[in-house]
Amino acid sequence: MSTNASDRLAMINLQLQQPKFSESAVICYEHDGIGELILNCPSRLNTMRMDLIAPIRDQLTKWNGKMKVLVLKSSSAGKTFSAGVDLKHMMENMSKGQHNDNLDFITVGYTLFHRMASLPRPLIAIFDGIAMGSGAGIGVHVSFRIATENTKFAMPESKIGLAPDSGLGFTFSRLDGSLGIYLGLTGFPLKGTDAFHAGIATHYVPSTRIAELEHRLASLPRPVTHDDVNDTIENVSNDSIPPPSMPSEIRRAIDRYDSVRAIFTALKEEQMSSSEPVKQWAQRTLAHLQTLCPTSLVVILAHIRRCGSLTLGQCFDHDYSLVQKLIIRPDFYHGVHTITRGSKARGSVVGWQPATIEEIEDERAIVRGFLSTPSTRPLHLVCGINTSDAPDFTEYPYRQYMLPSEHDIKDILEASTERHTSRTSGLDFILSHLNGKHGTREKVLEVLDRKTKTIDRVLKWID
């Protein structure tokens, strides 16, 4: 039997060994030194409740040091990873006066998410489907995040009167330019390749190769290092990853911002652009922002900016304080009722308070009220003090497995002693200083097209 045929047979046998999914919210499955955590609530889109996050917490404790690799995925592969917090369940708790039950759930969730970010064992989250809100937060901080062609990554919290939480302020504040602020304000989804180029995912793997990836991981001899896992993912990754889908001229427009009011003004001005793609984008984005919670938009902008100077643990503390203030506001009730009841909610509940961004007289006062005043219940997240497996950090500890950032590319280009006369010359020089990761060439090309210009026959970076 050929090696390829043997590999295919082994993969088929592995798939046949997969457990028949029961009604358990999470399936915990061990094979060949691999510990799989399988989200298994398809009827509710794997939304987050205590019955989903508590088993993951308990299983990680049970597996501590025993598994060579951990995998987090969904039984609804190709459709849904997780659609976030179960808003209906949260609202039911609030209607019964069980506010502390919601806070207990958030406490357990944040503590789990932070712990998953700093596990010593390689942990792979496979975003093969919708990853939204806290459903994105449960996997976005782990050492390896895989996007596929089915990925739809979004934080649409401004639609329900909230702000990106679950540590996503940490993630968004570290994306290139103002992309994180744009994603946080609009809640627009990113497809798989764009999530990869943005740095939200560390790798892009076609869904048809996920089974092969798991087979290769199972074949790795102990001990397994993060480098071993990275090499394995790279070997099954697509070597012809498309470039980012957002045109460079729109990315340039996104990077121009100040206050929320100024963003609205800038979008109105962009509608006069000579570029038809920019004009249409500005019209669509402004119309969308005008439907979202004005207070949330102000809070989100300041929140993401502040998270840029915080550690991940501090971001969770910050989120916890902020969420407590937002979920008791009428805006939250309005947003959730509008989503869960659709047209039936119109006219039955009040709208946003205030209704428009123009009605907000002082954005700074809103920021002070939400971001600078203490909450009634602190998180007390322990980071790197009394627990050896939850150190805190200001950058993701396995950042070397991600695509280079704009800052990385700029630093390499400006460190060159050569006078690069073209983007081609600059591209070759930059690629020679990077690790050859799939997608690197496409990312560097996009950044150079957007951020450099040849002046006096010398390629220069333009901020």
Image (cartoon, grey):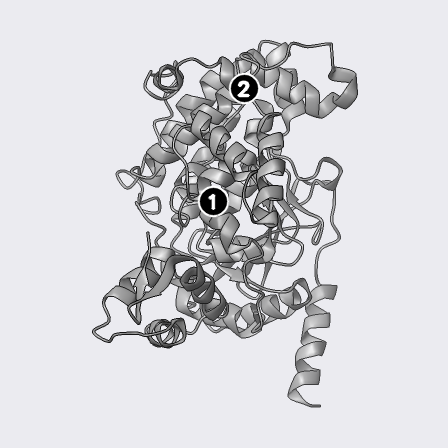
Assess disc 1: are there few (<14), some (14-19) or many (≥20) residues with their C-alpha within 10 Å of its C-alpha: some
Q: Secondary structure at mark 1?
A: helix
**Figure check: 155 above or below 332:** below
Q: Amino acid at mark 1?
A: Ala
Image point 50% across, 17% down: which residue? 358
**Figure check: 383 above or below 327:** below
Toward the viewer: 260 or 74? 260
**Which badge, 1 or 2, comes first in the chain's sequence?**
2
Looking at the rendering, which quadrant does residue 409 occupy? Answer: bottom left
Q: Position of residue 393 (x, y in %)?
A: 30, 45
Q: Which residue is mark 2?
A: 101
Q: Position of residue 141 (x, y in %)?
A: 45, 47
302 left or right, relative to 140: left
Toward the viewer: 311 or 347? 347
* Name of the residue lying farthest toward the bottom: 1
Q: Which residue is mark 1?
A: 253
Q: Position of residue 128 (x, y in %)?
A: 64, 54
Toward the viewer: 170 or 19? 170
232 left or right, relative to 91: left
Q: Position of residue 274 (x, y in %)?
A: 55, 47
Q: Secondary structure at mark 2?
A: helix
| Label ID, residue 411 | none
Image point 42% across, 28% down: which residue? 319
Mark 1 or mark 2, whichever is nearer to me:
1
Q: Amino acid at mark 2?
A: Asp
